[in-house]
């Protein structure tokens, strides 16, 4: 009997030695005359267990991890293929508490299947969403997305159905679907995981969006720092065309939709939708004034749906059967469905966790994340990327939803959570936010371009003890100007980490001269 062994080829797993482990498992089995098949998957998101090796026995997967090259021979010696006891044994993966407590919808296939095996994708629910969409008209598809309560997962949280309906009802001879995979926020990797672990879900979601709004062409804009994701998506496109997910006859119908890949050049600002459009059109990534909205006049002046990759990859699950009702039943209030949360920074069990909206930050950081990796007290949590607020420990019981976070002056962003212990200098972190904005500003508007540079200088004066009160007042005025006067969210949100650090950690802005 041939055993199937599953080892991720996700970029994180590969960076930790997964390729070498896979090669050693293959050669060791051959040396011992054991018949195995190694399946390279995406990652389940348990980065703290990578490289993760799973053995399939009677249809159930059993995990071992983290496995290093030095562990491989010992695994075979102790007969891990037949589940003999081993210190790295994790038991049945479906029963692993870290996974069992999640609600995997968007990431249900990640780490489970070979990402480029179209038959495996189909066997795990793929194609069903597109097949249903082909039997519905535009209004019905959009109504299903509305009923599910899907909102943009890129940060803004704008209702997806409203955006789609605007494009659908705007007359034009050509419309476009643009997938924003320019994932530049610190501590985020959900886009990358989906592209590397379930690329056909992204493609299927874009095709459904095309049917919904009358678009026949799509583009996926991927950040250049993701070579593995680019390679996987590039390999997935011809397979999708051959399987009917793309091309002139979607699943044998008369509907048409095709797409292509565009790679960014490393500019953080191109995560902003209009700067992304500028880049797609071959120009420097600069923010466009609004109106007009991209839904009315977007790519090449045509009505354009611009959605984050996670948003689009969730659509096939919503269109499956009565998926919109089931998905909409998850979550809380106006924040419905699930959110992939990425745990990073000083945390014991870093990785991606998909949970319903309403889950508390404490549950995510303490129960899933295991607290700080240093075992020191938690000092701060930054939620929402480099422009997100710094929250103190007494804010950990806030529910993870758009409205709850907004009420305490925070934002969800792309779902990245970065944890800091009590050794962190939050004054330095606030300075970093200003310096980051100064570096990444497109330069289009004065508040962002000049304000961020002056902000770094003011923070330096405060921390040096120069005219502290006057400079604190100046910094607050500067932050207000950037918030109200910037053309886009880069300048408009840079004040958020600064003002939150000032509010919650004022002691970290004291005179630091002469301190160790």
Image (tube, helix red, strand yellow):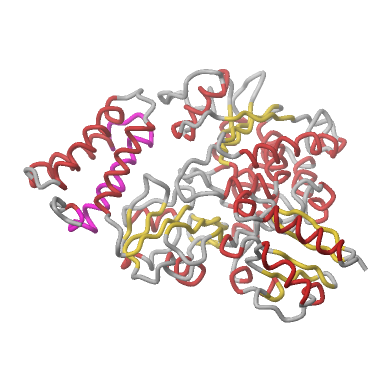
Q: Is residue 301 left or right of residue 87?
A: left
Asked which quadrant contains residue 288, the reply is top left
Which of these two is toward me, 151 or 507? Answer: 507
Which of these two is toward me, 318 or 230? Answer: 230
Q: Is residue 369 visible?
A: yes
Q: Residue at left 45%, top 47%?
A: 186
Asked which quadrant contains residue 300, the reply is top right
Above or below, comparing residue 506 to residue 223 in the picture: below
Above or below, comparing residue 231 to residue 31 in the picture: above
Which of these two is toward me, 502 or 404? Answer: 502
Q: Which residues are magenta?
A: 483-508
Where residue 380 appears, as percent x and y from the top left, is 33, 60
Where residue 15 appears, as percent x and y from the top left, is 60, 51
Q: Is residue 361 left or right of residue 80?
A: left
Above or below, comparing residue 428 to residue 58 in the picture: above
Where residue 363 appears, as percent x and y from the top left, is 47, 69
Q: Residue at left 34%, top 36%?
A: 437
Q: Residue at left 42%, top 56%?
A: 418
Residue 66 highlighted magenta (yes or no): no
Asked which quadrant contains residue 377, the reply is bottom left
Q: Is residue 505 left or right of residue 78?
A: left
The residue sitting at the bottom extreme is 85
Q: Where's the N terminus, which quadrant?
A: bottom right
């Amino acid at each position: 009997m041939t055993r199937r062994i599953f080892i991720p080829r996700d970029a994180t797993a590969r960076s930790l030695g997964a390729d070498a482990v896979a090669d050693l498992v293959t050669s060791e089995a051959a040396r011992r005359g054991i018949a195995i098949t190694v399946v390279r998957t995406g990652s389940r998101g348990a980065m703290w267990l990578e490289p993760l090796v799973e053995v399939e026995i009677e249809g159930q997967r059993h995990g071992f991890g983290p496995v290093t090259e030095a562990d491989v021979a010992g695994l075979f010696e102790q007969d891990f293929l037949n589940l003999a006891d081993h210190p790295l044994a994790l038991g049945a993966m479906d029963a692993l508490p870290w996974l069992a407590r999640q609600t995997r919808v968007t990431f249900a296939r990640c780490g489970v299947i070979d990402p480029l095996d179209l038959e495996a994708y189909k066997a795990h629910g793929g194609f069903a969403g597109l097949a249903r969409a082909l039997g519905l008209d535009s209004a019905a598809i959009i109504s299903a997305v509305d009923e599910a309560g899907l909102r943009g997962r890129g940060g803004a949280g704008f209702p997806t159905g409203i955006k789609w309906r605007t494009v659908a009802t705007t007359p034009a001879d050509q419309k476009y679907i643009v997938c924003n995979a320019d994932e530049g926020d610190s501590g985020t990797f959900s886009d990358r995981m989906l592209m590397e672990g379930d690329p056909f879900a992204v493609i299927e979601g874009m095709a459904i969006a095309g049917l919904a709004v009358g678009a026949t062409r799509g583009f996926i804009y991927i950040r250049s720092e993701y070579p593995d994701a680019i390679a996987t998506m590039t390999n997935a496109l011809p397979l999708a065309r051959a399987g009917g997910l793309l091309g002139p006859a979607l699943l044998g119908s008369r509907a048409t939709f095709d797409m292509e890949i565009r790679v960014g050049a490393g500019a953080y600002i191109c995560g902003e939708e209009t700067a992304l459009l500028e880049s797609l059109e071959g120009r420097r990534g600069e923010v466009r004034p609004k109106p007009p909205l991209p839904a009315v006049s977007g790519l090449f002046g045509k009505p354009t749906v611009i959605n984050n990759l996670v948003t689009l990859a969730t659509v096939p699950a919503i269109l499956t059967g009565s998926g919109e009702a089931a998905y909409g039943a998850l979550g809380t209030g106006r924040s419905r469905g699930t959110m992939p949360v990425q745990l990073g920074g000083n945390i014991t069990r870093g990785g991606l966790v998909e949970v319903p909206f309403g889950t508390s930050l404490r549950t995510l950081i303490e129960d899933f994340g295991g607290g700080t990796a240093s075992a020191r007290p938690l000092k701060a949590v930054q939620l929402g990327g480099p422009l997100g607020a710094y929250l103190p420990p007494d804010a950990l019981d806030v529910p993870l939803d758009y409205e709850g976070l907004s009420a305490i002056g925070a934002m969800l962003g792309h779902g990245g959570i970065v944890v800091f212990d009590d050794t962190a200098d939050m004054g330095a972190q606030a300075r970093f936010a200003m310096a980051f904005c100064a570096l990444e500003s497109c330069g289009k508007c004065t508040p962002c371009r000049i304000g961020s540079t002056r902000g770094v200088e003011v923070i330096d004066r405060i921390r040096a003890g120069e005219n502290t009160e006057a400079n604190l007042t100046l910094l607050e005025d500067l932050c207000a100007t950037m918030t109200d006067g910037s053309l886009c969210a880069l300048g408009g949100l840079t004040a958020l980490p600064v003002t939150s650090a000032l509010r919650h950690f004022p002691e970290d802005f004291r005179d630091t001269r002469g301190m160790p």
